[in-house]
C-alpha cells in the first residue's frame, strides 16, 4: 500500500517530505537498536521517539516512514534533518495501539522477521 494512501485514510499529519513509497509492513519499537536489528526495509515505523537519531535509523534500514504516535512534539532539528535526507515523518494524536488497529483495518501487517 502506498504511504500517501495511509496518510489519507488515517488522517496523519505530515511533518516532512511525503515520499510516495510502498509500505511493506509495520514495525513498532521505541528502541533504535531494535529498529536497526529487526525492522525490514519498507516498514512503517511507529514510535514515540522524536530525537534526530530516528532519521539516521530510518535511513540505515530504508524504512518507508516514521509515524510518531501519541501526538508527541517533534523538535525542529529532527524535522529539518528528515527534510535534508528525504525521510517522511508523520504524526498522529492517536495512541500506538489505536494506530495499529487502524493500520490492520486498512490491510497492513506486522513485521514477520
Image (cartoon, grey):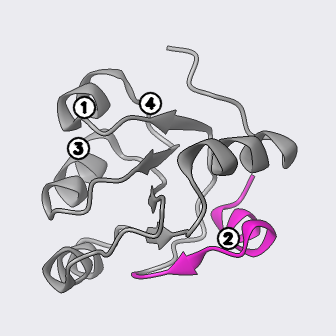
Residue 46 relative to residue 106: left or right: left
**Residue where numbered disc 1 is placed:** 36
Question: How far, Cα to Cα, is label 2 from label 1?
Answer: 24 Å
Mark 4 vs 3, N-terminal side: 4
- Distance in Å between CA atoms under marks 1 and 4: 9 Å
Ranked by sequence position, the earlier of labels 3 and 2 is 2
Q: Which residues are magenta?
A: 1-16
What residue appears at the point 39 percent right and 81 percent down from the top-left corner?
16
| Mark 2 or mark 1: whose residue is earlier in sequence | 2
Q: Which residue position is annotated with label 2?
A: 7
Whether residue 2 appears in magenta in the rendering, the answer is: yes
What's the mark number on residue 60?
Answer: 3
Check disc 4: other Cα within 10 Å, few if <14, some if 14-19, many if 20+.
Answer: many
Q: Residue at x 13, y 81 (%)?
A: 77
Q: Secondary structure at mark 3?
A: helix
Say whether marks 3 and 2 touch (CB < 8 Å).
no
Question: What residue is drawn where x is 24% and y is 34%?
Answer: 31
Q: Residue at coordinates 30% horizontally, 50% vertically from top-left?
A: 58
Amino acid at each position: 500500500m502506498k504511504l500517501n494512501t495511509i496518510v489519507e485514510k488515517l488522517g496523519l499529519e505530515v511533518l516532512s517530505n511525503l515520499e510516495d513509497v510502498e509500505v511493506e509492513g509495520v514495525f513498532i519499537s521505541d528502541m533504535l537498536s531494535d529498529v536497526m536489528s529487526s525492522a525490514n526495509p519498507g516498514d512503517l515505523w511507529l514510535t514515540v521517539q522524536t530525537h534526530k537519531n530516528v532519521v539516521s535509523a530510518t535511513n540505515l534500514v530504508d524504512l518507508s516512514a516514521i509515524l510518531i504516535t501519541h501526538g508527541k512534539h517533534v523538535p525542529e532539528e529532527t524535522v529539518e534533518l528528515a527534510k535534508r535526507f528525504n525521510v517522511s515523518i508523520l504524526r498522529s494524536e492517536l495512541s500506538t495501539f489505536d494506530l495499529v488497529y487502524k493500520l490492520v483495518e486498512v490491510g497492513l501487517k506486522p513485521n514477520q522477521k
